Image (tube, helix red, strand yellow):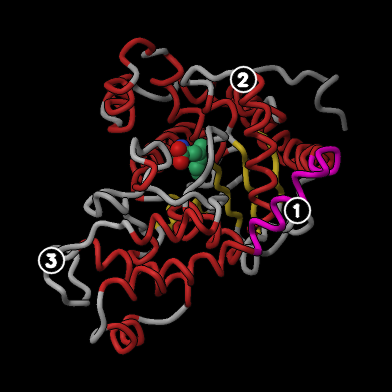
Amino acid sequence: MTQAHTARPIVLSGAQPTGQLTIGNYYGALRNWVAMQQDYDCLFCIVDLHALTVRQDPKQLRQWILDLAALYLACGIDPDRSIVFVQSHVPAHGELAWLLSTFTQIGELERMTQFKDKSLRHKHNINAGLFTYPVLMAADILLYGTHKVPVGEDQKQHLELTRDIALRVNNLYGPVFQVPEPLIAAEGARVKDLQDPTKKMSKTAEAELARVMILDDPRDILKKFKKAVTDSRAEIRFDEEQQPGVTNLLDLWCAATGRGREAALGHFSHHQYGKLKVETAEAVIANLEPVQARFRELSADRAALERILAAGAIRARQRAETTMKTVLETLGLPLDPGRFHG
Ligand code: TRP
């Protein structure tokens, strides 16, 4: 079977199945992915192989993979329009990662800030997979002829490396890989930590109050927003430097209501922080409640979820094999007729 040729450019993105996602992931990634289905030929991957770079409990990991699949769908990713799949269901990811590792310099990997950060956080387990993580990510992207990769600021460096690897191979052998471009989320979509609004909201933040999870109970969401750190200026305006907490709440209100900064100021500027906190919470809850309801429905039918992932894997594998055939041929590796017939 040949690659499906659609006129739309190809988008690929993914998230690790390592726990619950935050509203930062929702407004910064998932919600944008959903919108992209309009204009792009999308693949959304659950990168379980990447998750293994940190020790996981096998039972827990399996559950998180299904939960993440349910969450993708609950947010509005349509498995008929987009390919939703699990990375480990497509063996070519690991295979291509090996091949690409021979085109990647150790020095390049040593410069990756995420590797440096993670090595500090997991001192007892600085495994080779943590080091070659970006090569596997390059394989994820290059395997599907991806044109655009929606990523957060923190993944920009990995995408740069992916481009460098792709260009290096293309310079040696001709146009083997599509060279991907980043799609960085807009400023407003960068949700900050509610307790330390100078930092990005992280799903692994120590303090529960610091992060709002997509699946948090609405009562907890309200509580977390009420306790959000602001300042003592008693003035509602956009000022990331002087008033990062207030600015974060305003930005979130805008993201959640779909209204602009002008509207936010018109609505809040002569009011107190309490109103901003409560109304931002309410707007976020209004976005999340339908997602949570769909998540519960989808999670209740595990077999149906597994069928969706199995169908996604078939479609992803077909595309991946097309790329693998080219790559293997290009590098001089003999094609196995049992694998590539016709
Ligand atoms: N490294 C990404 C993250 O931690 C996840 C990821 C893996 C990814 N492969 C990808 C993102 C391919 C985009 C494209 O967020």
- Residue 261 visible in the picture: yes
The residue that mark 1 highlights is 79
* Residue 187 in magenta stretch: no
Q: Element under label 3?
A: loop
Q: Element under label 2?
A: loop
Give the spatial CA distance, label 3 vs label 2: 66 Å
The answer as to whether callout 2 falls within 8 Å of ligand 1 is no
Q: Residue visible at 22% across and 77% down?
A: 236
- The residues colored magenta run 290-305
Amino acid found under the numbered disc labelled 1:
Pro
Identify the disc placed on residue 332.
2
Identify the disc placed on residue 232.
3
Residue 9: x and y in percent read 60, 60
Neighbour class for label 2 at 10 Å: few (<14), some, many (≥20)?
Answer: few
Give the spatial CA distance, label 1 vs label 3: 47 Å
- Quadrant of the image occupied by residue 105: top left
**Numbered circles on residues, count:** 3
